[in-house]
């Protein structure tokens, strides 16, 4: 067995880190969309990812629906869950304070997890990779085709969101709600619709993250919380509310994990990630790309 | 008049009480399993198995004419809940003995409870420490366990490695009780088998990818990798190993890999993976003269007929625990101290995971021969060699 040159190892760590980071980034984007419009941290975000994976398994593997159609159905299905979450858990709260709303999302995440356990049981599920499992060998660096899908979807989501927020009337209305809900209401924007839209959108992105992750790491009902924590860390690292920040935060977090696992000690990789996160917050309390002036106006 | 009615009424109640009492005298047995939560893949088949065995005994008329009343609780893989349930079983339900918990961490957490309340516990978890008090160097008097200790699995793997001429290895383990305990045994026993551990990598139970750890190992070029984990992460490791083109480095899994479901989930990546397994996983592969052939075949057929799902090795631990207890109840009746004594001296009990020979120094009763070394071939187990 020939040993692997150090440079190749390093590249392999970076490839791995970027892939995991892309998943974290997508979860972080989901956090940001809802945070920007409502100022709440949706702690059920991880459950959207879990549902994305498991619904895809049902539609694609069990019902045998072809991949592109199954993809669409899954995203649609999870989006519906996001809409229901807003209608059933967020909107009925009579005197919403940020804290009660966040607690409502915690309750929702427990319910979603419980229902998922009843539907899919406790065992993990696998999904066939979108374009096969033959690894691509780039001069000693191994890349799974699925990695490219993960990173590709992150790029698509990023471009799509940029277009949505800058070029469409709905996107601009959502940005307006994010800046100042009262002023947005005064110019005739239906803030409630925007909140609904934000939940739908972040559920859809969560679903995409889940169904691209499943062929790599399997999916079971219990996965959501961990992904939510990592994604939340990424959102904080990049600056809560900032989309470029979420992508940067996710990728940086993934890279730190992979590099510290490979080069330092794998037992402490989560600790290294947290240390870097804390260090960043000491130096820049608003995160890497966050804006302190903006956060000062937020209630949370 | 009222007084007389009251007296008659009280007398009736008293007599009825007497009359009902004997009917209530059934053998109450407790069970705590992690039926939901992170360790549900252990607790679920264990619960199903224990219920199946008890149902079978009761249908056949019970033990000495008494039915077994099995009270099963779910600890949700949570140590605090597990502890409360253990106390509830002993003080409120007044059971004579308890089987479970499913997980090493939880079993260790309730050991003091059973020692204090002087109630026999037959654990279904792997760690050697459950039946080994580090202070005295002997087992805890009231605690027994049926799964092979992880030290035995380590010995079985190292013995196989010696046969294959493997000296330089890397180990990987998950950062929870099962992985940590296995890792300790791997490190402790390596010198005795003249095995050199060049890398000692870890990962979290919910990690999505172990490419980084494996890449590091690839750089060190050992002859074999031993992975110690349970749950989805052990499937991800095997897939990553295959993706990185590391087939030349032989892959050994712990006995936690003992479910065909894992081979299926690995989607072809598990071919050529070695793993030590108890007899009940490979009942149909055993030679006809194997001492465990009959019990394992019966259990496999019963379980698959009743639940219509493949057998997992973990249910076998519950089978061993409840069957041992039933055996003790039959011999000595519902007396905690006598059950404990009986279990401690029990010899030649043919179970799903080996032939048990308990003694005052050994509350597990198994040797490394309780493991068969198997290799994944054509998406199924095959005996190694």
Image (spheres, coloured by chain):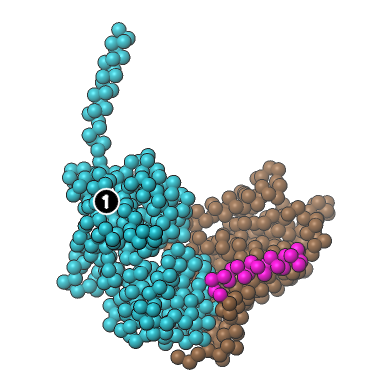
Q: Colour of chain A?
A: brown
Identify the residue shown where x is 56% and y is 67%: A210
Image quadrant containing the N terminus of chain A: bottom left
Neighbour class for label 1 at 10 Å: few (<14), some, many (≥20)? many
The quadrant in which residue A112 appears is: bottom right
| Chain seen in cyan | B
Q: Is residue A30 left or right of residue B158?
A: right
User: Which quadrant would the C terminus of chain A be assigned to in this image?
Assistant: bottom right
Q: Quadrant of residue B194?
A: bottom left
Percent x, y for residue A258? 59, 76
Residue B249: percent from the left, percent from the top?
A: 42, 85
What residue is at 57 percent from the left and 54 percent from the top? A109
Q: Between A121 and B314, which is closer to the camera in this rendering? A: B314
Q: Is residue A249 left or right of residue A182?
A: left
Along the line of sight, which residue is nearer the eye, B18 or A109? B18
State the image coordinates of residue B336 (x, y, percent, origin top left): 27, 46
Tag 1's secondary structure?
helix
Q: How many marks?
A: 1
Helix, strand or loop for the magenta stretch, by majority:
helix
Q: Confirm whether residue B259 shows in the render.
A: no
Instruction: Indicate the position of residue B163 as horizontal and vertical percent values.
Output: 30, 84
For disc 1, the marked residue is B340
The verdict on residue A275 being magenta is yes
Part of the protein shown in magenta = A265-286
Quick check: can you spot residue B51? yes
- Among all residues in the image, which is located at the extreme top? B1
Please check the rendered image and state whether residue B362 is part of the magenta-colored stretch, yes or no.
Answer: no
**A279 left or right of B300 in image:** right
Q: Residue at x 32, y 52 (%)?
A: B142
Q: Is residue B92 left or right of residue A35?
A: left
B266 w.r.t. A191: above or below: below
Chain of the residue under label 1: B
């Amino acid at each position: 067995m020939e040993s692997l040159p150090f440079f190749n190892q390093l590249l392999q760590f970076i490839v791995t880190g970027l892939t995991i980071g892309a998943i974290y980034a997508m979860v972080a984007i989901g956090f940001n969309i809802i945070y920007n419009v409502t100022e709440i941290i949706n702690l059920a975000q991880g459950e959207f990812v879990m549902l994305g994976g498991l619904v895809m398994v049902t539609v694609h593997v069990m019902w045998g629906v072809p991949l592109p159609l199954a993809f669409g159905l899954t995203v649609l299905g999870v989006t519906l869950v996001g809409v229901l979450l807003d209608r059933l858990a967020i909107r009925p709260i009579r005197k919403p304070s940020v804290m009660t709303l966040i607690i409502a999302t915690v309750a929702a995440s427990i319910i979603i997890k419980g229902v998922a356990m009843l539907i899919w049981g406790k065992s993990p599920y696998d999904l066939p990779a979108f374009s096969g499992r033959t690894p691509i060998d780039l001069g000693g660096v191994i890349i799974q085709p699925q990695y490219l899908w993960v990173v590709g979807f992150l790029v698509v989501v990023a471009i799509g969101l940029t277009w949505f927020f800058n070029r469409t009337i709905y996107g601009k209305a959502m940005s307006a709600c994010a800046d100042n809900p009262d002023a947005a209401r005064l110019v005739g924007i239906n803030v409630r619709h925007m909140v609904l839209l934000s939940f739908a959108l972040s559920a859809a992105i969560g679903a995409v993250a889940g169904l691209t992750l499943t062929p790599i790491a399997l999916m079971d009902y219990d996965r959501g919380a961990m992904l939510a924590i990592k994604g939340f860390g990424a959102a904080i690292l990049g600056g809560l509310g900032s989309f470029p920040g979420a992508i940067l935060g996710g990728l940086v977090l993934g890279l730190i994990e992979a590099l510290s696992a490979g080069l330092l000690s794998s037992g402490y990789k989560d600790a290294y990630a947290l240390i870097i996160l804390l260090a960043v917050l000491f130096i820049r309390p608003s995160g890497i790309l966050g804006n302190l002036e903006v956060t000062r106006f937020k209630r949370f | 008049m009222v007084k007389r009615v009251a007296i008659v009424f009280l007398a009736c109640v008293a007599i009825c009480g007497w009359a009902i009492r004997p009917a209530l005298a059934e053998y109450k047995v407790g069970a705590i399993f992690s039926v939901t939560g992170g360790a549900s893949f252990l607790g679920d088949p264990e619960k199903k198995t224990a219920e199946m065995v008890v149902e079978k005994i009761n249908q056949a008329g019970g033990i000495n004419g008494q039915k077994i009343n099995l009270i099963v609780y779910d600890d949700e893989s949570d140590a605090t809940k597990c502890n409360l349930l253990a106390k509830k079983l002993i003080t409120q339900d007044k059971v004579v003995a308890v089987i479970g918990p499913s997980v090493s961490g939880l079993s260790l957490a309730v050991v003091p409870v059973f020692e204090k309340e002087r109630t026999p516990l037959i654990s279904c978890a792997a760690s050697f420490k459950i039946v080994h008090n580090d202070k005295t160097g002997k087992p805890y008097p009231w605690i027994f366990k049926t799964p092979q200790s992880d030290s035995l699995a380590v010995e079985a793997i190292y013995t196989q490695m010696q046969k294959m001429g493997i000296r330089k290895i890397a180990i990987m383990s998950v950062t929870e009780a099962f992985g940590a305990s296995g890792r300790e045994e791997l490190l402790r026993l390596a010198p005795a088998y003249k095995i050199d551990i060049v890398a000692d990598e870890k990962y979290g139970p919910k990690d999505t990818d172990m490419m980084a750890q494996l890449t590091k190992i690839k750089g060190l070029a050992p002859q074999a990798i031993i992975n110690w984990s349970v749950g989805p992460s052990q499937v991800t490791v095997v897939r990553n190993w295959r993706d990185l083109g590391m087939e030349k480095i032989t892959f050994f899994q712990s006995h936690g890999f003992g479910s065909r479901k894992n081979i299926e989930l690995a989607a072809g990546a598990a071919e050529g993976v070695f793993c030590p397994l108890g007899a009940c996983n490979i009942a149909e592969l055993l030679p006809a003269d194997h001492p465990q052939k009959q019990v394992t075949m019966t259990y496999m057929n019963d379980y698959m007929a009743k639940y219509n799902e493949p057998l997992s090795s973990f249910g076998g631990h519950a089978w061993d625990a409840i069957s041992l207890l039933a055996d003790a109840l039959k011999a000595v009746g519902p007396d905690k101290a006598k059950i404990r004594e009986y279990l401690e001296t029990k010899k030649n009990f043919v179970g799903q995971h080996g032939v048990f020979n308990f003694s005052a120094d050994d509350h597990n009763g198994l040797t490394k021969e309780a493991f068969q070394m198997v290799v994944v071939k054509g998406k199924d187990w095959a005996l190694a060699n």
